[in-house]
């Protein structure tokens, strides 16, 4: 008969250990108790949920299917209150008594509540589990004042999360440096500066003594007599092991339940793992030790006693987007034989320190650039002799062969510290399961599903090993902001960034260039549907003055003539304007528009007013025009009213910005007189139907547009065209024309994501387009209300030179 | 004041927006004045490449990117960036803010005779610019 294994705790440690036990043998009938009402999730990613980067569903580690598949009885919402070690039963707070043959205690830890008066008041929170996170999300709102007590990993992550939710956040820390257990004074200083740059206030050396307020938190008071206001308070001052059950079971307990190197407690039938245990005097509060302990415990409990747990090198990574902090090992400089190797650059906010003890790495602190962290952890774990590498400690020589890094690693090297996945395991998975993408690798090995810091290394490894590996050819936007554009869009959205300079300050080099500034300007405009802080200095001159700069510094003016349909009266006005301002050249463009060339900047507002026509946007990456043929009104062959359809399409999209210029065409029959099949978006009239085509080009490149869909009514055609329009706006990279975009993404995917997408997805695209359109205005109206007094005005010096 | 140079009061500092430039004509010289937030910098308003109006360029740190063909000019030194030459190709001027007014220091002799092109020797290719942002295409 199978033995009954009862696991108390449905968290990462307990379930990871059960996974290891299952690998050894199916000899147990397993019951898991969890006092939370959720399946096992990745607790270390709660801060990402708070920061809006992930949903609660995204961080689930084991779904209900997994429990079912392994015939594990899951008892959620039941807290085990008592253990009868002699009678071998556990008792739940629902009164149930369950017998066991082996018991595994994985109760984790609880938030440490410092002796502060009034912590029971409403509006005082902790940040430990999913319910806490949800409560904080419910409470957080723009403008609310939040005080986070504790400037360690968790406190800082909570602070940033709340700030992303719009709160005005202050971190209060007892010590003189943030994350003092992981950083030194200098590193803490860099971190503080970065947090303040994000907009989080930091108060150091403040001993909080009371939460103020009647029934509800209204502020916190410090020992020095000062106080600050708060709408709510989060306590993140550390954790303490939940060792109570161990005491009740009569086990040896100090701070945590004492375990030996085989993960045995003082009772041969009771085991413990994770944050509730104490091994060799140490209690761990980070994720990597859980997995290492779990493996050893699984061997011991299944009768394969042998592997030993000999403690874990503590490594911590701060999970705040744009604030890279990594720390591992011991960084006391005081003992003899210790050298500290340092590098810092205040302008970049980069600080690195290695502690070398007798030629071996003892500790590392990285702030601002953690890209080399895996190398250092490797040196720490393997106790590599660094004597011959002293010159390359902080600056590795340039890699000649990109696979070199990977080839130099031993198979036993741990790639994913969170899940304890080695290089060997990954290679084996690649060979046996034919893995070729990171997603498959995550599913199969769990690698890179924890903190995510090994993602890059996993990619390298896949690239080096997998025959089918397809590199996602993602180029970073530029050196100033080193992220691929899709990632940047995610960052801007989730971090609620609304100005170019803010993005550059937090995620870039603070400076920016002519490549990233206009790109970021576009992204912000698109993401916030025009509701952002537009920074004209980040835009190209054409977008500062709404005209196209020419080789001699003059500008060209192209009024909007929708569908290319004008009138004698309009033409007369244009002619008068050309005369009045002595326009050197009047040109009919290839887009059925009229171009007035050679205009002085100072004349632009007056000309626009005299024209009385909206901007044709011929100067910008935006909606240029819809070119039309004469359609059914006069043409003998026309079968669809292309002029009316084209004018309506232009009206619906005009004044909007796009990743690159966007040209459209509408033709009334397949003779294609207005060349709709080589436009970014084309409507091609057929007898009784419209073909909507996308991705055409007749510029540097000539490409026939792909058919998006064929529809019957003009309204359906317009709907399909605008759907594609918004999809392109949201997903193309900056300066990517539709013809490159459609080829990169594939027309099949474009169709799936637009015209064949579920109704809700289509409605989402439409709603965002509607919002953008609501705020979009004719740029030429700025002629009457300039953004800046000298936007169009030539500055005259206040004095001449006196000679 | 040095013997052959003189400070000229140009404009209220708020007339030049943050991280933007404006051109100003002083006698026969056209000068581009930039607001970098912590200071103002001034150079001739003409790109050594094709004479583009540098005052209309995007500012990147202490560099301005010419709006015509994206040549990059260092506002402190007047050198063209990325051409491997230290020779200044654009004349720079001292600038300061006094009582909210931007002053530019001009050499007196320059006002007597018309300015001559500086000795820029590097041969540059019109297509050298990385990105033609203002590409035409109506």
Image: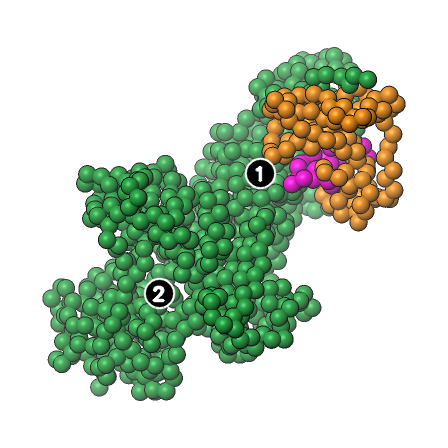
Chain colours: A green, B orange
Residue A339 visible to an observer of this rendering: yes
Residue A158 visible to an observer of this rendering: no
Q: Quadrant of residue A253?
A: bottom left
Judged left or right of residue B84, residue A572 is left
Residue B98 rendering spot, x and y as whole percentages: 63, 24
Residue A543 rendering spot, x and y as whole percentages: 64, 31
User: At x 52% / y 41%, what residue is drawn?
Assistant: A502
Q: Which residues are magenta?
A: B50-74
Tag on residue A285?
A: 2
Foreground residue, A508 or A495? A508
> What secondary structure is marked by label 1?
helix
User: At x 25% / y 72%, what residue is drawn?
Assistant: A254
Of marks 1 and 2, the one in the foreground: 2
Q: Is residue A687 above or below residue A489?
A: above
Residue named by callout 1: A521
> What secondary structure is marked by label 2?
loop
Residue A728 rendering spot, x and y as whole percentages: 57, 43
Dot 2 alpha-carbon crowd within 10 angstroms: few under 14, some 14 to 19, many 20 or more: some
Q: Upstream in the sequence, badge 1 or badge 2?
A: 2
Subunit ID for the residue under disc 1: A
Judged left or right of residue A588, residue B116 is right
Q: Quadrant of residue B47?
A: top right
């Amino acid at each position: 008969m199978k033995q009954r294994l009862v696991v108390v705790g449905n968290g990462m440690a307990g379930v990871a250990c059960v996974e290891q036990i299952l690998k050894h043998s199916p000899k147990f009938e397993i019951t898991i108790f969890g006092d939370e009402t959720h399946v096992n999730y990745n607790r270390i990613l709660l801060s990402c949920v708070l920061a809006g980067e992930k949903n609660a569903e995204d961080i689930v580690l084991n779904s209900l299917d997994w429990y079912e598949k392994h015939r594990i009885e899951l008892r959620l919402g039941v807290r085990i209150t008592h253990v009868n070690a002699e009678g071998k039963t556990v008792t739940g707070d629902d009164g149930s008594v369950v017998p066991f043959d082996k018991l595994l205690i994985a109760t984790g830890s609880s938030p440490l509540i410092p002796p502060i008066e009034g912590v029971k008041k409403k509006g005082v929170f902790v940040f430990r589990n999913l319910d806490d996170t949800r409560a904080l999300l419910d409470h957080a709102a723009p403008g609310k004042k939040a005080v986070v007590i504790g400037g360690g990993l968790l406190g800082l992550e909570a602070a940033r999360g709340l700030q992303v939710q719009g709160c005005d956040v202050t971190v209060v820390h007892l010590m003189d440096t943030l994350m003092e257990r992981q950083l030194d004074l200098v590193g803490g200083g860099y971190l503080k500066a970065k947090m303040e740059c994000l907009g989080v206030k930091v108060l150091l050396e403040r001993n909080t003594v009371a939460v103020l307020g009647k029934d509800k938190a209204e502020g916190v008071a410090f020992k020095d007599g000062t106080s600050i206001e708060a709408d709510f308070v989060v306590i993140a001052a550390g954790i303490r092991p939940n060792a109570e059950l161990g005491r009740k079971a009569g086990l040896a307990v100090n701070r945590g339940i004492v375990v030996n190197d085989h993960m045995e407690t003082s009772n041969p039938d009771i085991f413990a793992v994770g944050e509730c245990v104490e091994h060799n005097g140490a209690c761990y509060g980070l994720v990597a030790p859980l997995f290492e302990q779990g493996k050893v415990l699984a061997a011991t409990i299944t009768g394969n006693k042998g592997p030993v747990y000999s403690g874990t090198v503590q490594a911590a990574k701060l999970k705040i987007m744009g604030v890279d902090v990594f720390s591992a090992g011991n960084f006391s400089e005081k003992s003899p034989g210790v050298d500290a190797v340092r590098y810092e650059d205040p302008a970049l906010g980069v600080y690195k320190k290695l502690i070398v003890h007798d030629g071996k790495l003892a500790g590392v602190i990285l702030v601002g650039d953690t890209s080399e962290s895996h190398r250092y952890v490797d040196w720490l774990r393997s106790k590599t002799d660094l004597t011959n590498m002293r010159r390359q400690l902080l600056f590795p020589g340039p890699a000649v062969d990109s696979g070199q890094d990977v080839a130099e690693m031993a198979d036993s090297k741990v790639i994913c510290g969170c899940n304890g996945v080695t290089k060997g395991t990954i290679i084996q998975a690649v060979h046996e399961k034919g893995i070729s993408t990171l997603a498959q690798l995550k599913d199969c090995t769990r690698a890179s599903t924890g903190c995510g810091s090994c993602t890059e290394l996993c990619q390298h490894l896949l690239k080096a090993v997998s025959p089918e590996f397809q590199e996602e050819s993602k180029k970073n936007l530029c050196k100033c902001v080193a992220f691929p554009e899709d990632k940047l869009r995610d960052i801007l959205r989730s971090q609620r960034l609304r100005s170019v300079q803010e993005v550059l300050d937090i995620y870039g080099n603070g400076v920016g260039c002519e490549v990233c500034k206009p790109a970021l300007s576009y992204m912000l405009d698109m993401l916030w549907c025009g509701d952002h802080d537009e920074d004209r200095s980040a835009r190209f001159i054409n977008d500062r003055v709404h005209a196209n700069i020419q080789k001699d510094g003059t500008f060209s003016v192209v009024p909007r003539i929708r569908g290319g349909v004008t009138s004698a009266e309009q033409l007369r006005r244009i002619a008068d304007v050309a005369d009045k301002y002595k326009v050197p050249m009047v040109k009919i463009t290839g887009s059925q528009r009229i171009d007035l060339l050679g205009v002085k900047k100072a004349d632009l507002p007056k000309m626009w007013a005299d024209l009385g026509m909206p901007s044709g946007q011929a100067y910008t990456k935006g909606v240029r025009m819809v070119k039309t043929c004469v359609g059914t009104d006069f043409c003998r062959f026309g079968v669809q009213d292309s002029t009316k359809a084209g004018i309506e399409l232009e009206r619906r999209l005009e004044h909007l910005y796009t990743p690159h210029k966007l040209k459209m065409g509408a033709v009334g029959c397949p003779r294609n007189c207005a060349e709709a099949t080589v436009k970014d978006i084309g409507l091609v009239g057929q007898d009784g139907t419209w073909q909507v085509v996308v991705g055409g080009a007749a510029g540097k490149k000539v490409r026939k547009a792909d058919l998006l869909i064929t529809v019957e009514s003009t309204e359906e055609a317009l709907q399909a065209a605008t759907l594609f329009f918004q999809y392109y706006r949201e997903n193309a990279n900056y300066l990517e024309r539709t013809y490159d975009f459609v080829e990169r993404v594939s027309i099949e995917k474009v169709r799936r994501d637009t015209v064949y997408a579920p109704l809700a997805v289509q409605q989402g695209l439409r709603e965002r387009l509607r919002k953008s359109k609501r705020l979009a205005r004719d740029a030429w109206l700025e002629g009457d209300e300039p953004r800046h007094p000298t936007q169009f005005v030539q500055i005259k010096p206040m004095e001449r030179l006196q000679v | 004041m040095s013997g052959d140079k003189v400070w000229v009061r140009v404009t209220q500092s708020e007339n030049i927006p943050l991280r933007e430039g404006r051109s100003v004509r002083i006698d026969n010289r056209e000068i581009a004045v930039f607001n970098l937030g912590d200071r103002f910098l001034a150079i001739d308003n003409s790109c050594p490449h094709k004479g583009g109006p540098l005052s209309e360029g995007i500012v990147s740190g202490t560099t301005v990117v010419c709006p015509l063909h994206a040549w990059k000019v260092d506002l402190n030194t007047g050198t063209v960036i990325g051409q491997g030459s230290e020779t200044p190709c654009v004349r720079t001027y001292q600038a300061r803010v006094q009582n909210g007014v931007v002053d530019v220091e001009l050499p007196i002799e320059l006002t007597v005779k018309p300015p001559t092109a500086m000795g820029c020797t590097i041969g540059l290719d019109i297509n050298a610019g990385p990105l033609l942002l203002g590409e035409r295409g109506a």
